[in-house]
Amino acid sequence: MNIAFIASEAFPYAKTGGLADVAGALPKALEKLGCNVKLFIPKYGIIDEKKFHLIFIKEIELPIHVAGTTRKVFLHQSVLPGSNVEVNFIDCPHYFFRKSIYTNDPDEDERFVLFNKAVIELINLSDWVPDIIHCNDWQSGLLPLYLNENYKTNKKLSRTATLFTIHNVGYQGLFSEETYYRAEIKKDLVLQFDPERSAGFSFMKTAVLYSDIINTVSQTYALEILTPEYGSGMEKILSERKTDLFGIVNGIDYSEWNPLIDEYIPYHFNFDNLDGKRRNKKHLLEEFNLSYEEKIPLIGIVSRMAGQKGFDIVAESLNELMKLEAQWIILGNGEDRYENLFRSLAHSFPDKVGTYIGFSNDLSHLIEAGTDMFLMPSRYEPCGLNQLYSLRYGTVPIVRRTGGLADTVSDWHEFNSLENKGGTGFSFKDYTSKALISTVSRAVETFKEKKVWKQIQKNGMALDFSWEHSAKDYLDLYKRALTKKT
């Protein structure tokens, strides 16, 4: 099967979040299943051409029309590390040579209008015919419409199907009605399906209306986004297409996230020998000038510091959480109020809390390897990756039961006996500080029961969240999408 995989970011070239991890790993997993996959991303100015061996394809120069102006688009290519997946970098310096991947610039919509147009035009001009165009998030949300309308008489692409993956329904690519003009899209193509919401333009809505199949990144989140609480205004349109809406939990790349070979941690360990985890804990505590006590659990947080991630109820809970016999290591950045809160927390409790404001890939691996527990109290979480990393590293997750967290972490006390051996962490449903405090307290108390704790660790480490399983599920969705073209 030929698959064109479209994303606005991909690891290791450009990354702001989980989408990049998916785009850097799923194409490789699909290739191992026998697919011919080509990845398409913008060529941002931050991408290191020499490091990633980009080759300029001098034969390609496309005139792409956006907002009444024709822009020249060029093509660079490389190969996704660890695979034979061809990576196509859409090069338009006017739009993509900027300080960051995403911007608040007035032409943010134009940037991705051009990206969508350039991708489909490159595909059309090549000798390669994709069976599936797999679009991810709003930045590639116009491709299904363009394929259905602008290329509907194109014999080459007449049987190409589309799948649109929603990684976070809260980010919809919302712009003014001027975007219809900039994208050269007739309003009626969208408004005929959604006359009640005529104001503005939504990249994601366009994708939901025109894709053959839609999916999101966990089964629970696929149900949640059909409700007003989680749908962010898209619940009505998604409900109308619920027979074409599916959920597939993201996988993780075990060549990068594996405590037995992780290049970012000083001591390796595995399911059969956890001594390296204890040594990593001591090393991590030393990095933050905290003392090591075998009987005191170390709780980690690695996160974007925002309300969506549950930091509002964490803030409400801190007085009680600091009374627990536990230590904390916190890594992240985001909203000023939370950054300042965790800075002051480390200052007020220098023997209990270590805080690093910013991002460090090295430290994120060490926290997964060296902590005993990992806290993810998200208000909503489409999939989540850190709980999957934690399970692999014998770090017991404490999560709110929502989205992918609900699908991947089972509460130990729901099984209530060592004989059941099924629990992998601790979870709570109510989005309240009371529920958070109670669940963290439960975990801290359970940590004292060493036999039980080791069983919980091993339960999590035995699970397999590799991309191989998720890729097979995506193949099933691709086949389902293709049946709609026959």
Image: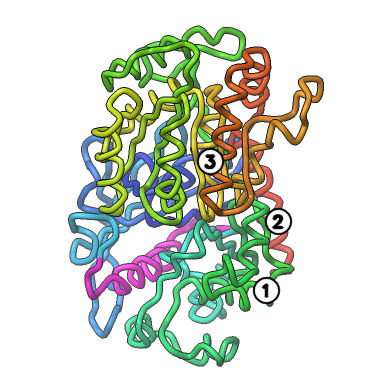
Q: Earlier in the sequence, mark 3 or mark 2?
A: 3
- For residue 8, above or below residue 359: below
Q: Which amino acid, mark 2?
A: Lys
Identify the residue shown where x is 33% and y is 32%.
361
Which segment did they paint magenta?
A: 104-130
Q: Position of residue 116 (x, y in %)?
A: 40, 68
Q: Nearer the viewer, mark 2 or mark 1?
A: 1
Q: Which amino acid, mark 1?
A: Ser
Residue 31 seen from this side = no
Q: Nearer the viewer, residue 282 or 74?
A: 282
Q: Position of residue 323 (x, y in %)?
A: 44, 32
- Residue bearing the label numbered 2: 479
Judged from the image, the secondary structure of the residue bearing numbered disc 2 is: helix
Judged from the image, the secondary structure of the residue bearing numbered disc 1 is: helix
Q: Pointer 2 and pointer 1: residues touching (CB < 8 Å)?
A: no
419 relative to 357 in the view: left or right: right
Quadrant in which residue 243 is drawn:
bottom right
* 107 magenta-colored: yes
- Residue bearing the label numbered 1: 239
- Residue bearing the label numbered 3: 437
Tag 2: Cα neighbours inside 10 Å, few (<14), some, or many (≥20)?
A: some
